[in-house]
Image: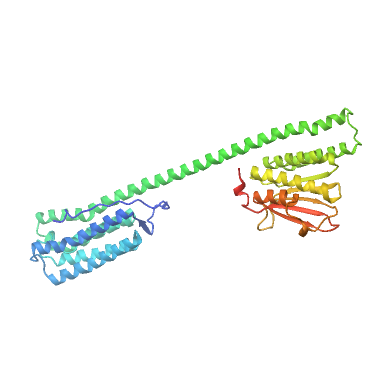
């Protein structure tokens, strides 16, 4: 009786398995692959050991029995090589294993003498139990049950001469059927339970990851809203100290609106308001408007009239870039005052506009332009303001500077940050 030759196995399914049907191949861990191989080898080795210790009296034809055993062993070896190489049990491999086992059960049983079909003389039964395990690992429950029924029928057909001898033989056959079908069926139930547990764990993990991502996103939104609220409050204070102060002085008649200094101040306040309106959705944009307006106001007593335009400022400009930009614009405007011979300049700050066709737009582009006398950029001496204060500041913040000028054509200083250029400047 071969009920002692049994084994169980269990496997966790892949995370991507979501449907009720079987997957093309069920992955196994290294430990389970090793266990599966050892179990199958022990099952294949059982019959030669039985023949060596118990003899061949129960066989009708030893050569034929050896042939059945050899064919089934080759099939098992092929299955083990495939499983070891792929790290999985495939449906096709399981079907081949079960088919060979079914044929071997019928042929091996017919090769045993009456009364010996339920004992160790049967050359195919031990390895056929392993085929049931392969089916349990690779196929759906319905397919596995169909194969168990086929294997049971095949075994009974092969040993019908022994079963017909009476109750004693039936008892041995029942024990072998339990080993042939019951153990793999139990393994299948374990596999199914583990699959369901793994699926539930996968779903729980996905939910946890989503919840963590949602929490992080909520934290980012809260931080962004806090930064925005702080910037709004700061801009409100600046408006109170600048624009509202100017308007109040004008309303009270405390200043002469015809005074060029007052007019420049009013124009700067107007640019300030326009910039705030244009950047109202970006805390960084509002901060830039405030910083640059402060620079423009500080330079107003020199007689320089600066027009400020701010649009589409990216929301993730680091503080280091804001500081570098403010300092560079200040120096560029100082150069306009000292060298251009004009009293008007234009400062433009813009990010990549929505829907742009540029495949690689600058994250931020700042220009300081005038229509003064201009100069030859190739003759700039190192150490002057443009090189030291503008190029150096922007370069340290990850940006690039391009100077376009010519005699009588004015000067444009363009500062830009390509995508990803200010990663190291964050903080």
For the N terminus, give its image quadrant: bottom left
Residue lying farthest to the top in this orientation: 252
Question: What is the residue that sits farthest to the bottom in this orientation?
Answer: 63
As drawn, which residue projects farthest toward the right? 258
Question: 304 or 79: nearer the eye?
Answer: 304
Q: Residue 199: percent from the left, percent from the top? A: 39, 47
Instruction: State the count of labels.
Output: 0
Q: Is residue 114 visible?
A: no
Residue at x 25% of width, y 54% of height: 184
Name the one closer to the observer, 183 or 237.
237
Q: Residue 287 appears at what percent x and percent y?
A: 70, 40
Residue 227 occupies which quadrant of the picture?
top right
Q: Is residue 13 rendered to the left or right of residue 58?
A: right
Q: Is residue 255 visible?
A: yes
Q: Residue at x 16, y 60 (%)?
A: 46
Front residue (pair 381, 96) = 381
Question: Compared with residue 427, is residue 377 higher up or lower down, i.e. above or below?
Answer: below
Dividing the picture into quadrants, the one containing residue 79 is: bottom left
Q: Is residue 347 above or below residue 357?
A: above
Q: Residue at x 50, y 43 (%)?
A: 210
Quarter of the image for the C terminus: give it.
top right
User: From what the image shows, is residue 170 above or below residue 211?
Assistant: below
At 87% across and 27% down in the image, what residue appears?
252
Residue 244, image x and y in percent? 80, 31
Provide residue 257's location: percent of width, then percent of height.
90, 35
The colour style of the image is rainbow
């Amino acid at each position: 009786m071969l009920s002692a030759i049994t084994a169980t196995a269990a496997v966790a399914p892949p995370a991507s398995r979501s449907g009720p049907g079987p997957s093309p191949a069920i992955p196994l861990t290294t430990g389970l692959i090793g266990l599966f191989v050892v179990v199958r080898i022990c099952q294949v080795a059982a019959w030669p050991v039985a023949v060596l210790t118990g003899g061949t009296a129960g066989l009708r034809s030893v050569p034929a029995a050896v042939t059945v055993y050899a064919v089934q062993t080759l099939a098992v070896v092929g299955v083990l090589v495939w499983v070891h190489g792929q790290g999985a049990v495939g449906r096709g491999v399981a079907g081949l294993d079960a088919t060979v086992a079914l044929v071997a059960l019928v042929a091996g049983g017919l090769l045993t003498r009456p009364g010996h079909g339920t004992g160790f003389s049967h050359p195919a039964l031990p390895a056929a139990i392993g085929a049931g395990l392969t089916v349990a690992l690779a196929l759906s429950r319905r397919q596995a049950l169909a194969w168990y029924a086929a294997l049971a029928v095949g075994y009974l057909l092969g040993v019908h001469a022994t079963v017909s001898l009476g109750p004693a033989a039936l008892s041995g056959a029942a024990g072998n059927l339990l080993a042939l079908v019951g153990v793999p069926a139990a393994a299948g139930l374990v596999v199914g339970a583990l699959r369901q547990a793994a699926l539930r764990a996968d779903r729980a993990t996905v939910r946890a990851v989503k919840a963590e991502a949602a929490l992080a996103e909520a934290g980012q939104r809260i931080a962004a809203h806090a930064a925005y609220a702080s910037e709004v409050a700061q801009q409100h204070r600046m408006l109170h100290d600048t624009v509202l102060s100017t308007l109040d002085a004008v309303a009270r008649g405390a200043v002469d609106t015809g005074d060029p200094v007052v007019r420049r101040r009013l124009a700067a306040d107007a640019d300030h308001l326009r910039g705030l309106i244009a950047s109202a959705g970006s805390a960084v944009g509002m901060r830039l408007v405030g910083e640059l307006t402060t620079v423009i106001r500080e330079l107003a007593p020199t007689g320089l009239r600066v027009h400020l335009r701010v649009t589409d400022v990216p929301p993730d400009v680091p503080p280091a870039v804001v500081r570098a930009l403010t300092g560079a614009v200040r120096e560029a405007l100082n150069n306009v005052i000292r060298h251009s011979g004009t009293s008007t300049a234009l400062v433009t700050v813009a990010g990549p506009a929505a829907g742009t066709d540029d495949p690689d737009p600058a994250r931020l582009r700042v220009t300081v332009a005038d229509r003064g006398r201009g100069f030859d950029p190739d003759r700039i001496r190192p150490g002057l303001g443009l090189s030291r204060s503008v190029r150096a500041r922007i370069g340290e913040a990850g940006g690039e500077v391009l100077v376009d000028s010519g005699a009588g054509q004015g000067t444009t200083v363009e500062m830009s940050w390509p995508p990803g250029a200010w990663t190291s400047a964050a903080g």
